[in-house]
Amino acid sequence: MFSQDDIRLAFDKLEPHWNEIEAEHKKREEYFLSLINNDYSETAELLKCHLIIEHYLNIFLEKELGLDNLNEAKLSFFNKMKLLPDNKVVTFVKPGIVRINTLRNKVAHQLDVKFSNKDLGEISSILKIARTDVDALSFIENIKKFTSVACTWLTPKDDKIQGYIAESISHIKYNE
């Protein structure tokens, strides 16, 4: 523990530099405020879409691959993606799911990431097949559209819609 005399002496030594210290503190506080007041709504939407896809990914892995207690395995999103088979309906959306994870990782480690439609990569290709008029949409609108597509394709095969999707691609031969 410090004595009051030690603390007083430390402040006395700082006193000649007080204006410089306050100016530096003000500069750092302004930077902090610029970060805290930044609009992170696009980042939040991307994170929400990533989380929703992971929810459907869990359902798919549990039902289609018979993986019970998936939460207890504490697998990362990346590891769950790796479990997706390359010979099922999900093959169509898997590259977009990989891309969503790449985008999510970017915002998880950088504060001021700005995305454009050029960053969509494989998501764009998938959406151009699955939806119309996606070129006119913003980056985050395309992310939301893709999330809807991915979640539909990750729905277990006993679902009526998934049955339609499976039937529609039944003629495709997979490289096994």
Image (spheres, helix red, strand yellow):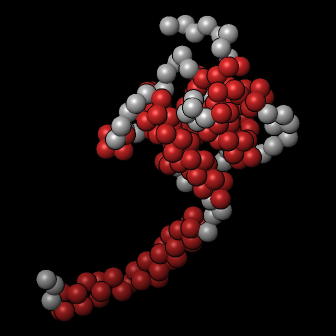
Image side of residue 124 versus residue 113, left or right:
right
In the image, what residue occupies the spot 60% across and 47% down? 49
Exactly how many numbered labels are in the figure? 0
Residue 72 rendering spot, x and y as whole percentages = 31, 44
Q: Nearer the viewer, residue 120 or 87?
A: 87
Vertical position of residue 47 compared to residue 163: above or below: below
Residue 27, located in which quarter of the rendered image?
bottom right
| Residue 68 visible at all | yes
The picture places residue 135, in percent across and down from the top left corner, at: 83, 36
Q: Residue at x 43, y 27 (%)?
A: 65
Residue 114 versus residue 44 in the image, above or below: above
At horizontal 60% and vertical 23% (from top left) the residue drawn is 89
Front residue of 176 and 27? 176
Q: Quadrant of the N terminus?
A: bottom left
Residue 58's spot in the image, x, y percent?
47, 40
Inspect this view and state whether residue 74 appears.
no
**Image point 61% across, 39% down: which residue?**
151
> Left of 63 or right of it: where is 172?
right
What is the quadrant of residue 11 in the picture?
bottom left
Q: Does 14 sit left or right of 105 as displayed? A: left
Of residues 161 and 89, the one nearer the viewer is 161
- At which x and y percent is residue 136? 85, 40
Residue situated in front as seen by the camera: 70 or 125: 70
